[in-house]
Each structure stands twice: as structure tokens, then as C-alpha cells.
Image (cartoon, coloured by chain):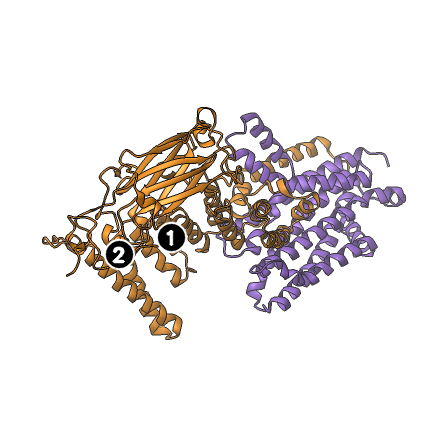
């Protein structure tokens, strides 16, 4: 465990020093701060647009950071040959991968946390809303984003064990988009009477296998409050559990592939 | 430590099964209930850059931008372009109540021909949009009210539907007192007079409660309006002979205003004077101004048509394209001096009136429930004081007394093709009598006075005063 934590802390240090990630973070923060100025887009829905826009910015920025952070982690170590100095020590390959992953997740958590703080300050100032009980629900969005991005990082890490970073960027982005869009599409397919059984079965299999990123998009009731939610807490717990299960699958797959790979 | 590959593969497969079961059986059903926007096909009309931005989580922002764009279309009168924008905005952000409300109004009212007749083929679309908006925003009264208003004002028929929507609007906490009044009116139009009165009384109780807490102008006005509504309604109920039957007694032989029923003596003639241009003549014995007879000219097999109208809410799907190859013209014929003479020109709007079918039905329909109060004072809320020797009908609207008749035209007749090229197609009801009345005094309206000769010889109440 000590070994894993040591690799993780080194990874966090590397992540916060990477300029490309800091630039993405800075742009994201800038958008969050200027979001109140875009209220002119709608007459009666200023609050809606503000929350929707800022949560969207955090999600997009977090996704970019997750992908850019993870896709280069393993290939860079191999390319720079620093991996040899690590693996020649009593460090197992799985420990190296898990450590790298935990480091990436920790760095991601820090960045999402920072953006959330800026979101809360921006929202408080622009809406003159300083009641913590009314601000607290806003945190749900970034919290679920964190688990969503942890899952995305696991996807990118798994791919990084056998494809180049450039290919990995497209692969991970594609999986993310598919995983975000497939639930609504699946819903339509399953509920439509005109779709035949074979297509429905095929859709169900895809829906079973694909990492379901849409599960973590809980912003609708935050953007439009007042909706009646069913078993909200239980939903959060099971969705986080789902993230852990799926991350487990991806890490195991990554370990299996990386263990066979010649470095 | 050497890894056990088989154990790892086994555990990965096990986790795959567990996550799938969790996702399919628990998370997805809850997600659908709590978080789904129920609009997966938003990409259908978005440019690729807009779609990308929308998918990235900025649906509300894109919806806002599109709605601002729609505003410029309104300004330039480019109404057709607004439709897809409305649909996109409501798909992207189903919580945009204003867009639903404006969209419904726009679809139902703004598509008109050169003579300002609405394209009724769009009404089901407007209703479907309102229904969707209400489902998406069940916490507010607004779209329940707006959909009810379409039934009450635009469709002006089947008032039970308006009542249904407004009763749902009443259940929402945010409904404004001024918006509550209209449900009582809808009850009256639907023939539920006692319910209408009770509604006013419950509103008065509420207004008095509000007055105890606040005595501002708005609260006082609400109470005064409700009191005035109750007074007016009680007078009408008394004049129209409802008090006796409602209290379990009879009218004790008193001739109330609604008795005996008045024969409106409807007759009609339709002449095709040019291709796609018709002249309509009708007789209607009612002297006071305010009667509008509904006329429909439609394909004989128009989908979901019913006598004098349409099954307007036949679908919940928002179909932006109406049946473009079908014709459905509806007009209100304004009666003055006891007759109608109207030229209806459909030649300038071929997209609205394509006339592709072979056979057409011309319908004339009058429902006393839609009549203004001064005419209802004679006809009653439910047509108790209304009759027509030839065309009284109690079947096309079950439980209601209406005037209804229909005539038939062919495509060749309307377009003056074939044998009709040099002839003038003319169809009329059997009781129609040509009269020079139709050619005289079309522009002036003769207002009946107390010294006017009786129209119905049997009706003693219209005897001239001496």
C-alpha cells in the first residue's frame, strides 16, 4: 500500500506541474467566472442558465483534464524510460498502475474541488445567495462529476496500456460521448413500439457493457429545482457503487494487458 | 507477487455482471424517473458545433441562444423558421415554460391565410406541445392554463377539455387568483352551471380570507370582481329559468326568457364563383348582433375529422408538419341583419388549401354554448331556448343541442374543372330561399329595438310595446 501511495503522490505532483492541465483549468475557471454575464440569453431563466452553464463548464473541463492527464501517464513513463527505474525496484506492475490511477484521481479531485469553490463564490455573488443550505445542493453536480471523471480516467488508463496517446484521446472521448448519449437513446429504443425485438436486445447488450456516464449527470434537478426525486440518496450511493465496480473492471483489464506487455 | 490471471479474469467478468445488473435494474429506471430529459433526438436540427456544445452539458445555454434567434424571426415575420427553433429549444431545455407557451400560441394563431383565417391543421400540434410542456413542468399551473386556453378560446368547442386542463391548473399552488376566475366560465360553457356558481363562491371565500390579511387594491379588486360575477350569474340563472329546477321545484308556469325555444331558421347556399373562391349565403333569424356560425370546408376523408371540427387532441406527438396534402378550412360566418353573405377566397393560399382530394364536405355548425351572454339569455347555457326546424342536432355533440348540417362538393366543382369549367356549381340546403335581402343593406346593421316587430309570432316577449 505504501508503494501505491508513494506512486500516487508522485503522480499528483507531476499533474499539478503540467502546464497543459493548468491552462485547461484556468480556461474553465474563467468561463465559470464570466457565466453570470451570459444571463442576457434568457428573460426569465437567468438562474437556470447560470447553473446550467457553470455545471456544464465544470463537466467539460473535468473531462478534458481527465483525458489529458491519464492518456500520457503510462506512455510517457515508457517513452522516457523512467518506468525501468520504478519496475526494477520491488514494485509490481499492478501496483504501478493502481498508484498512477489513484494519483490521477486525486489530482482530478483537487481540480474539480477548486472549480466547485469558484462556482459557489460566483453563484453567491451574482445571485446574492449566501444561505449555505441553498448553496449546498449545487455541490451534488461536481461531486458526481468527480466519480464520472474517475471512471473516464480508468477508461483512458486501460487504453493507455496498449495504444498511443493520440489514439487514446479519440478512443476515450468516443467512449465518453457514447456512454453519455446511449442512455437516452436506449430509453427511446426500448420504449418505442416500432423498434423490433432484435434491435432492442442488441441495444440492451450495448447498454449492459458500455460504461454508462449518463448515470452521473444529475444536474437537471439542480438547474430546474422543485422536481420530485425518487430515492435520491439511494441513487447516489448505488451510482457511486457502480463507478467503483466499473473502475474495478477497467483496472483489472489494464493490469492484465500491462502485465503481458513488453516494456 | 505473481498475479493470478484466471482469478483476475474471473473477477473482472463477475464485476461486469454485477455492474450490468445494477445499472439495468436499479440505476437506469431511477435515472429515467429523476434525471432524464426524455429528449434524445435533440441533434436532429442542430448544427454540428451547436450539437457538440449541447452535448457537452450546455443545453440551457444553447436553448437560450436559439430562443434569442427566434425573437429576430418573430420581428421579421419569418414564422416558418420559428417552428423548428421552438421544438429544439423545448427539447434542449424542457423547463423553458415561456417557449412552450409562446410556441403554442404561435403555432395555433399565427399561421393564417391571406384573409386571416388560422390554419387549423396546426391545432393538434399546438395542443401536443402544450401537453408535453405540462408533463415536463407539472409544478407550475402555466402550461395547464395555456393548453386549457387553446381549448376555450381557439377551438371554442368541447369545453370539457378546457375544464379538464384548468382543473389541473387549479391544483397548482402558483396559480394567480385572476386566472382562477376563468374556470367558472369554462364550467358554464360546459353546461355545468352549479359547478360554475360554486367555483365563484369558493373564490369569494378565498378573496375574503385574503382581504383579512391584506387590504391592498389587488385583493379588494379580486373580491369585488368575484362578487360581481356571482351577482351576474345569479341574475342570469334566474332569467334563464334555472333556479326552479335547481332547487327541486318547477318554474310554476312562468315564461322564462328561454321559453319557448326560438327557431333560428338556418338555411345555406354555397356557390363556387371562381376556382377556389366560394360565396356563402345563410339565413339566421336572430336579430341581435353577435352570432357566428362555424363553417368548415374539408376533405371528406380528413383524418380525425368529426362533425363541425376535428378530434383535436388525437395525438401526443408534436408533429411540426401538418398534413400538407389535406384541406381543412374553418371560418366563422358573422350574422348581420339575419343573414350571412360572405366570399371566401382560398385561391391565394395553395399550400393551406391544396384541394387534392376528390370529395369535400361543407359543414355548418352552431353551438349555443359558444354564444355571447346576450344571446345565451334567450338560448340558455345549454341551448334550452334554441331550436331549428330542420337542423337541430343532438347526436354530433352528445348531451348538447347544436345546429348542424353538411353539404358536399367535388374537386372539379371547387376548381371548376371538366364539366364545371363553364358552369357555376351551386349547392344549398333544401330550405334555402333566394331573397333580395342578400343584396341590400350589407354594410349597415339594423339594431333591434323595443318597438321591433316580433320575429317569432309565438314568442310573446318580443311583442312591440305600445
Instruction: State the image coordinates of residue B386 (x, y, percent, origin top left).
Output: 23, 46
Instruction: Classify residue B75 by image quadrant.
Output: bottom right
The purple-coloured chain is labelled A
**Which label number is shown at residue B443?**
1
The disc numbered 1 marks a residue on which chain? B
- Residue B22 seen by the camera: yes
Q: How far, Cα to Cα, is label 1 from label 2?
A: 16 Å
Binning the other alpha carbons within 10 Å of mark 1 as few (below 14), some (14 to 19) or many (20 upward) gives: few
* Along the line of sight, the residue nearer the viewer: B440 or A187: B440
Q: Which mark is residue B448?
A: 2
Pair 1/2: label in front: 1
Q: For this rendering, which residue is in front, A150 or B72?
A: B72
Give the label on residue A34, or none.
Answer: none
Pointer 1 or 2: first along the chain: 1
B397 or A66: nearer the viewer: B397
Residue B290: x and y, percent?
Answer: 33, 53
Q: Is residue B234 above or below residue B379?
A: below
Toward which corner of the image does residue B278 lie, by quadrant? top left
- Determine the secondary structure under disc 2: loop
Q: Relative to residue B343, is residue B8 drawn left or right?
A: right
Q: Residues within 10 Å of mark 2 (few under 14, many from 20)?
A: few
| Residue B196 shown left or right of residue B296 in the figure | left
| Residue A18 shows up from this direction | no
Amino acid at each position: 500500500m505504501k508503494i501505491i501511495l508513494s506512486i500516487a503522490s508522485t503522480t499528483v505532483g507531476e499533474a499539478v506541474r503540467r502546464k497543459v492541465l493548468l491552462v485547461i483549468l484556468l480556461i474553465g475557471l474563467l468561463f465559470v467566472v464570466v457565466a453570470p454575464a451570459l444571463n442576457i440569453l434568457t428573460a426569465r431563466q437567468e438562474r437556470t442558465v447560470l447553473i446550467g452553464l457553470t455545471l456544464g463548464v465544470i463537466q467539460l473541463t473535468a473531462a478534458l483534464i481527465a483525458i489529458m492527464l491519464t492518456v500520457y501517464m503510462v506512455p510517457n513513463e515508457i517513452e522516457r524510460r523512467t518506468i525501468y527505474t520504478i519496475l526494477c525496484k520491488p514494485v509490481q506492475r499492478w501496483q504501478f498502475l493502481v498508484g498512477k490511477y489513484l494519483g490521477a484521481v486525486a489530482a482530478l479531485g483537487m481540480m474539480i474541488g477548486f472549480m466547485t469553490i469558484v462556482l459557489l463564490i460566483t453563484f453567491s455573488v451574482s445571485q446574492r445567495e449566501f444561505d449555505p443550505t441553498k448553496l449546498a445542493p449545487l455541490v451534488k453536480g461536481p461531486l458526481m462529476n468527480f466519480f464520472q471523471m474517475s471512471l473516464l480516467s480508468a477508461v483512458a488508463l486501460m487504453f493507455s496500456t496498449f495504444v498511443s496517446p493520440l489514439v487514446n484521446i479519440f478512443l476515450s472521448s468516443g467512449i465518453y460521448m457514447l456512454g453519455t448519449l446511449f442512455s437516452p437513446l436506449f430509453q427511446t429504443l426500448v420504449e418505442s413500439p416500432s423498434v423490433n425485438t432484435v434491435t432492442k436486445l442488441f441495444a440492451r447488450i450495448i447498454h449492459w457493457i458500455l460504461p454508462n456516464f449518463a448515470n452521473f449527470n444529475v444536474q437537471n434537478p439542480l438547474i430546474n429545482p422543485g422536481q420530485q426525486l425518487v430515492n435520491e440518496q439511494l441513487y447516489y450511493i448505488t451510482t457511486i457503487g457502480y463507478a467503483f465496480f466499473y473502475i474495478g473492471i477497467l483496472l483489472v483489464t489494464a493490469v492484465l494487458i500491462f502485465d503481458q506487455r513488453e516494456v | 507477487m505473481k498475479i493470478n490471471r484466471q482469478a483476475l479474469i474471473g473477477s473482472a467478468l463477475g464485476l461486469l455482471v454485477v455492474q450490468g445488473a445494477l445499472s439495468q435494474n436499479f440505476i437506469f429506471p431511477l435515472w429515467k424517473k429523476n434525471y432524464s430529459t426524455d429528449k434524445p433526438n435533440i441533434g436532429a436540427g442542430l448544427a454540428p458545433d451547436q450539437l457538440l456544445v449541447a452535448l457537452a452539458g450546455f443545453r440551457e445555454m444553447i436553448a437560450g441562444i436559439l430562443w434569442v434567434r427566434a425573437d429576430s424571426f418573430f420581428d421579421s415575420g419569418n414564422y416558418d423558421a420559428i417552428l423548428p427553433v421552438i421544438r429544439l429549444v423545448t427539447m434542449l431545455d424542457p423547463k423553458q415554460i415561456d417557449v412552450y407557451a409562446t410556441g403554442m400560441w404561435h403555432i395555433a394563431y399565427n399561421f393564417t391565410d391571406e384573409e386571416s383565417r388560422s390554419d387549423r391543421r396546426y391545432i393538434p400540434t399546438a395542443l401536443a406541445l402544450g401537453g408535453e410542456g405540462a408533463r415536463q413542468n407539472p409544478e407550475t399551473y402555466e402550461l395547464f392554463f395555456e393548453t386549457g386556453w387553446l381549448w376555450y378560446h381557439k377551438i371554442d368547442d368541447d369545453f370539457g377539455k378546457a375544464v379538464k386542463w384548468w382543473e389541473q391548473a387549479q391544483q397548482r399552488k402558483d396559480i394567480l387568483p385572476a386566472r382562477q376566475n376563468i374556470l367558472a366560465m369554462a364550467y358554464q360553457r360546459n353546461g355545468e352551471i352549479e359547478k360554475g356558481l360554486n367555483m365563484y363562491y369558493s373564490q369569494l371565500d378565498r378573496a375574503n380570507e385574503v382581504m383579512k390579511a391584506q387590504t391592498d387594491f389587488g385583493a379588494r379588486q379580486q373580491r369585488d370582481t368575484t362578487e360581481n360575477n356571482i351577482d351576474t350569474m345569479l341574475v342570469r340563472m334566474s332569467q334563464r329559468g334555472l333556479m326552479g329546477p335547481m332547487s327541486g321545484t318547477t318554474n310554476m308556469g312562468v315564461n322564462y326568457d328561454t321559453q319557448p325555444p326560438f327557431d333560428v331558421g338556418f338555411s345555406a347556399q354555397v356557390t363556387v364563383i371562381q376556382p377556389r373562391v366560394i360565396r356563402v349565403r345563410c339565413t339566421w333569424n336572430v336579430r341581435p348582433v353577435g352570432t357566428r356560425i362555424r363553417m368548415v370546408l374539408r376533405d371528406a376523408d380528413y383524418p380525425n375529422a368529426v362533425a363541425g371540427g376535428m378530434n383535436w387532441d388525437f395525438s401526443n406527438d408534436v408533429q411540426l408538419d401538418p398534413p400538407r396534402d389535406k384541406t381543412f378550412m374553418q371560418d366563422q360566418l358573422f350574422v348581420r341583419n339575419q343573414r350571412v353573405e360572405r366570399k371566401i377566397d382560398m385561391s391565394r393560399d395553395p399550400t393551406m388549401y391544396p384541394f387534392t382530394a376528390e370529395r369535400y364536405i361543407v359543414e355548418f355548425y352552431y353551438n349555443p354554448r359558444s354564444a355571447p351572454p346576450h344571446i345565451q339569455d334567450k338560448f340558455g347555457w345549454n341551448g334550452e331556448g334554441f331550436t331549428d326546424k330542420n337542423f337541430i342536432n343532438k347526436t354530433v355533440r352528445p348531451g348538447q343541442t347544436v345546429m348542424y348540417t353538411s353539404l358536399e362538393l367535388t374537386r372539379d366543382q371547387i376548381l371548376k374543372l371538366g364539366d364545371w369549367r363553364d358552369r357555376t356549381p351551386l349547392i344549398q340546403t333544401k330550405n334555402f330561399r333566394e331573397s333580395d335581402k342578400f343584396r341590400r343593406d350589407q354594410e349597415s346593421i339594423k339594431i333591434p329595438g323595443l318597438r321591433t316587430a316580433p320575429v317569432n309570432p309565438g314568442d310573446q316577449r318580443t311583442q312591440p310595446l305600445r
